[in-house]
Each structure stands twice: as structure tokens, then as C-alpha cells.
Image (cartoon, helix red, strand yellow):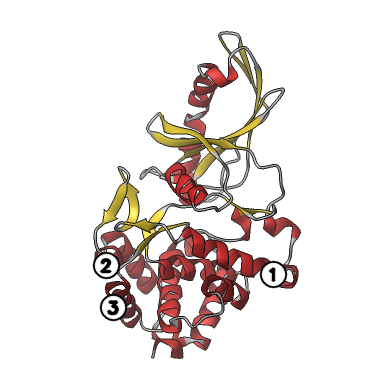
């Protein structure tokens, strides 16, 4: 497909990949509807004026449309959120870059047909998960580096909890986030479909532990919410990308990170060591966070029939239920 905007020539090299899962239909529709707006954005942008521009849609990711924009002398990435709540990706990337974390440099951000977008640097490197297995990640100390990096990402002080709405947190207090309508729907789905039970650990106890902890620590951070080797480039140091920006307590983000690895059958203790620099940490709080992540993630995994992921998590929760005592 070729389009012209002034003297800018735009060539779309492919079409966005659509998900075959019914639960993702809304994202498929939004993905396709945004193609004309991508064309208009490029054709009217001074960066691409009088140039021939090739656009390739990346095939990874469900909740965003990722366009690799290439001219004769540079490559950039245009990422458009497909979620109804928008995103604060550019805001978070800038905060992390300021404290020394390697991230794609943000060129600009804004709204495109009601969807938040970020235009950023293209990182010419493979994704970490594609070139290292678990043994190699351990041997090379990459898990330790990941933990240290996440700790640095949590160092800037934030305000509030939950999604980012108009640049601010959805909730002022942690207890309002963990007991929000969205979270309650997830707890209910898991319960009604009998995905988790008391043998996996008490949800009520986990909530109580986390509320008490956040009352005592009283610190919110800029959280990645999907921190894992699939969202890192194999650079030196590692480059962090593709956050699902949330404000929350650091233990929630660390627990979500561990959940992502446990789901694959791995428990990277080295990552915890890197995060806390081999110092003591609150194991009960961290395990409560992993259980909450399970209730948060299971509805989507169940709808997509990701049975192995859920089984790995269930086995881990049963084996470590005692950590909530």
C-alpha cells in the first residue's frame, strides 16, 4: 500500500498482525482503524518531509500498534496504545532515563485519534529472551542486573496508585487500588471459575499484608508492570522497553516480575538478590504480591487457554503457601 502526503512517499511494507483470540477482538479493530492515521501523521511530520518512508508493523504485542518507520538515514519507532485508558509510556521512559536507566529515547508523544502515541528511538539489538536461556541468564549475571535495574527504576518518588489518568494516579491510597472495582472483578472471575483456592494461599490475608506494608512504607513508584526478558534489548547495559505504566508500591512490581518468570517455570532468586543487593527483604510481602498478580493475570490467561502458565503458577503457590503465615 502506497500513500502520498505532499512530497513525502509512504510505503507500508506489511499489515498489522491480528490476534486469533476472541478476547482480543477490540484490539484488532482498533489496530486496523489506526492505519490511516499513521499515514497522516507521517505525511504531515517535518521529520519525514520530502522523504521516502517505509513503514513496517511489528508483530509482537497485543495492546499496542508498533510501527517501525525507516528513511534512508534513520529508523524510529511509533508506538500507539490500543487501550481505552491511554498510556503514560513516554512519561515513565523519561523519568527512568533521568535516573540513568537505558531506555529508548523519546522524541515526542501525544494523541492520535484518541489514542496515546510515543515516537522514540529504534534500538538495533535482539530481545534478551531470544538469545539467552535461563541458564545463560544466570551464568552471565543478567538476572542480577535486571534486579538492580528495576530497583533504580523504582527510586524516583511517585504519587498514588493504579493506572495513569491525565498524568496522575487513578487512586490516592493503595487500599483503594487493591479493592477497586477492576480488581474485585478479577477476584470474582478467578473464584467463579475455580482457578485458585485456599490451597494456593488466602487472598484476604495477602490483601491485608499488602495494605499493612504500604501503610508502613508509604512510597509509590513508577512501575513497569511487565518487566521481563521479552521487554528488554540485549545491550550493555540492558535497554528496558514496553512498560505497562502504573503507579504502585515497589513490591507489587517486583512480585509481578517474578510472576512473569514463574509462569515460565523459572524462579530467578538472582533477580531478587540484584534488587535488594543481597540484603534482607520482606519475603511475606513479596509472596503476597505474587498471589495478587496471579488473581490479576489469571482471567486473561484463562480466556486464552494458557493452561501451562496457570499450572506453573498454581504449583508454585501451593509449595510456598506457608510464606503468608
Residue 15 falls in image quadrant = top right
Please state if 201 lies on the left or on the right of 46 as rendered: left
Residue drawn 44% across the image and 77% down it: 286
Q: Which mark is residue 179?
A: 2
289 up-or-down from 128: above or below: below
Q: CA distance from mark 1 to mark 2?
A: 37 Å
Answer with mark 2 or mark 3, whichever residue precedes in sequence: 2
Q: Secondary structure beneath disc 2?
A: loop
Between 324 and 250, the one lying in front of the other is: 250
Label 3 neighbour load within 10 Å: few <14, some 14-19, many 20+: some
Residue 135 falls in image quadrant = bottom right
Q: Badges 2 and 3: C-beta atoms under 8 Å apart?
A: no
Answer with mark 1 or mark 2, whichever residue precedes in sequence: 1
Image quarter of the C terminus = bottom left
Please state if 204 lies on the left or on the right of 227 as rendered: left
Q: Secondary structure beneath disc 3?
A: helix
Q: Secondary structure beneath disc 1?
A: loop
Q: Position of residue 179 (x, y in %)?
A: 26, 67
134 up-or-down from 16: above or below: below
Q: Position of residue 230 (x, y in %)?
A: 62, 56
Label 2 neighbour load within 10 Å: few <14, some 14-19, many 20+: few
Which residue bears the numbered disc 1?
141
Q: CA distance from mark 1 to mark 3?
A: 33 Å
Residue drawn 29% across the image and 76% down it: 216
Between 21 and 246, the one lying in front of the other is: 246
Q: CA distance from mark 2 to mark 3?
A: 14 Å
Image quarter of the N terminus = top right
277 up-or-down from 185: above or below: below
Front: mark 2 or 3:
3
Using the rendered image of the protein, determine whether residue 15 is visible from the camera's viewpoint: no
Which residue bears the numbered disc 3?
212
Amino acid at each position: 500500500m502506497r500513500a502520498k502526503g505532499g512530497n513525502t512517499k509512504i510505503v507500508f511494507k506489511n499489515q498489522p498482525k491480528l490476534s486469533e483470540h476472541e478476547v482480543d477482538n477490540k484490539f484488532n479493530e482498533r489496530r486496523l482503524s489506526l492505519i490511516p492515521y499513521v499515514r497522516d501523521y507521517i505525511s504531515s511530520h517535518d521529520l519525514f518531509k520530502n522523504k521516502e518512508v517505509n513503514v513496517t508493523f511489528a508483530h509482537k504485542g497485543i495492546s499496542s500498534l508498533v510501527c517501525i518507520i525507516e528513511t534512508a538515514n534513520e529508523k524510529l519507532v511509533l508506538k500507539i496504545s490500543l487501550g481505552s485508558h491511554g498510556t503514560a509510556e513516554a512519561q515513565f521512559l523519561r523519568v527512568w532515563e533521568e535516573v540513568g536507566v537505558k531506555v529508548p529515547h523519546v522524541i515526542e508523544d501525544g494523541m492520535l485519534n484518541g489514542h496515546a502515541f510515543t515516537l522514540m528511538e529504534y534500538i538495533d539489538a535482539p530481545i534478551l529472551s531470544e538469545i539467552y536461556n535461563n541458564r545463560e541468564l544466570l551464568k552471565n549475571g543478567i538476572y542480577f542486573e535486571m534486579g538492580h535495574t528495576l530497583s533504580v527504576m523504582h527510586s524516583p518518588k511517585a504519587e498514588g496508585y493504579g493506572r495513569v489518568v491525565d498524568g496522575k494516579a487513578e487512586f490516592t491510597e493503595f487500599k483503594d487500588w487493591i479493592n477497586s472495582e477492576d480488581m474485585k472483578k478479577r477476584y470474582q472471575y478467578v473464584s467463579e471459575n475455580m482457578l485458585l483456592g485456599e490451597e494456593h494461599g488466602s487472598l484476604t490475608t495477602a490483601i491485608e499484608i499488602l495494605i499493612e506494608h504500604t501503610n508502613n512504607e508509604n512510597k509509590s513508584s513508577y512501575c513497569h508492570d511487565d518487566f521481563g526478558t521479552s521487554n528488554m534489548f540485549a545491550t550493555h547495559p540492558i535497554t528496558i522497553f514496553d512498560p505497562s505504566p502504573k503507579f504502585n508500591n515497589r513490591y507489587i512490581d517486583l512480585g509481578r516480575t517474578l510472576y512473569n518468570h514463574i509462569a515460565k517455570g523459572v524462579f530467578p532468586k538472582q533477580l531478587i538478590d540484584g534488587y535488594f543487593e543481597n540484603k534482607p527483604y520482606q519475603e511475606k510481602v513479596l509472596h503476597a504480591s505474587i498471589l495478587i498478580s496471579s488473581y490479576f493475570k489469571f482471567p486473561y490467561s484463562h480466556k486464552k487457554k494458557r493452561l501451562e502458565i496457570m499450572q506453573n503458577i498454581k504449583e508454585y503457590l501451593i509449595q510456598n503457601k506457608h510464606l503468608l503465615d
